[in-house]
Amino acid sequence: IRNPKKTTRGEIDFMKAYTNVSRKTVREDRVAICPNFGCEFMTRVKPLKLRFFGFGKYPKCKKHHIPLVYVNERIGDFVDAALACLFDKAGLPQQELIEGIKSRFPHETTPFIEGWVYCIIIGRGASIVSYYMDSVSNTYLKQLTKKQIKALKKGESSKPNLVNKAIRHGMDEITIQYTRILKHLRVHSKIFSEYENLKPLSKNLRNFLKEWQKEIIKGSEVIKSLENKTELTLKEIKSNYDKILNIGTCRSLLGLNPENKEIKKSKVTAFDRFSAYHEFIP
């Protein structure tokens, strides 16, 4: 964890500097997106006529009313945050939980661990990542004309005047980052998940895990700490987010929706967790 300074959830922000999205300085058409993870607002940024005449000189998100960033500069950050969240070692079952299962259900310890590892990426939001990347790709294409889309599909052999370098680079970057996500998920499914070793858990163990979830939410003040703007270090914030994410993994293992009702009420979304993990990246 870097810079464990005192901060609140609302104050967590990204430190990276982005190119200023301005119609006054852009030299060719580009596509910009809201920097908030999960927001699908996107628009085409066109140069001002004579670098002076026109409206919307500094485009902002219509929902969050904040300056936009160019897609090719931001999409990699989302993938970095998603991968950091999905494959963080904190996603493994806590030692206390393993010890509890060992003492009560010694014959089910291995099936539990293998099942947990199999469910990690789903429990921590892999399906949401895939949905968001699909949405970004589709929304990006909607900013282009039919001729430009055809030109992109044809690649370098297409007429260069139809699609400028910035537009093409943005689409290429989305493709690269989406491929990057898929490669990691494929490696996880092949190496860390041996399907033949997966076994259903007994009713008693399932009940034990349900009680464990209740205790985590009830006893750790996780929800309250994320709802209230209490001053916490980054390490404390990460610990609370990881507890929520581990509950999602546990629920996936039990065949339930990863999103717990109490967590939904707190309005702490999966994208909030990815945003937090972007700050946790060293």
Image (cartoon, helix red, strand yellow):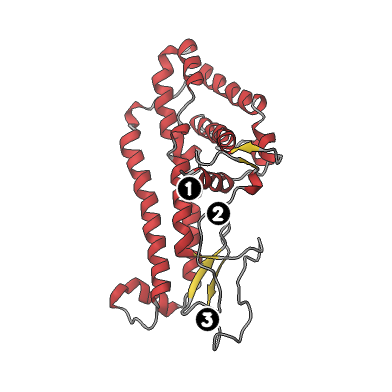
At x 42% / y 28%, what residue is drawn?
115
Residue at point 56%, 48% (across, down) = 271
Residue at the outermost top position:
103
* Label 1 element class: helix
Q: Are the two marked residues, 1 and 2, in contact with CB atoms closer than 8 angstroms? A: yes
In the image, residue 227 above or below residue 36:
above
Crowd tier of the residue under label 1, counting other residues whose Cα lies within 10 Å: few below 14, some 14–19, many 20 or above? many
Q: Dot 2: what SS?
A: loop
In the rendered view, would you say 167 is above or below 275?
Answer: below
Q: Where residue 179 appears, x then y in whole percent?
A: 36, 54
Estimate how packed mark 3 is, as few (under 14), some (14 to 19) or many (20 or more) residues with alpha carbons within 10 Å.
many
Q: Residue at x 71, y 39 (%)?
A: 228
Sequence-wise, the earlier of marks 1 and 2 is 2
Mark 1 — residue? 81
Front residue of 227 and 261? 227
- Above or below, 190 relative to 31: above
Along the viewing direction, whichever of 214 and 19 lies nearer the viewer: 19
Q: CA distance from mark 2 to mark 3?
A: 26 Å
Q: Percent position (x, y) of residue 132?
A: 50, 55
Say which mark, if any, is on residue 37.
2
Res. 153 image quadrant: bottom left
Amino acid type assigned to the residue bearing label 3 in the image: Pro
Which label is found at residue 47? 3
Q: Give how far across and how far down residue 280 sits, in percent.
A: 51, 42
Judge from the rendering whether residue 234 lies leftward or rightward of residue 191; answer left or right.
right
The disc labelled 1 sits on which kind of residue? Ala
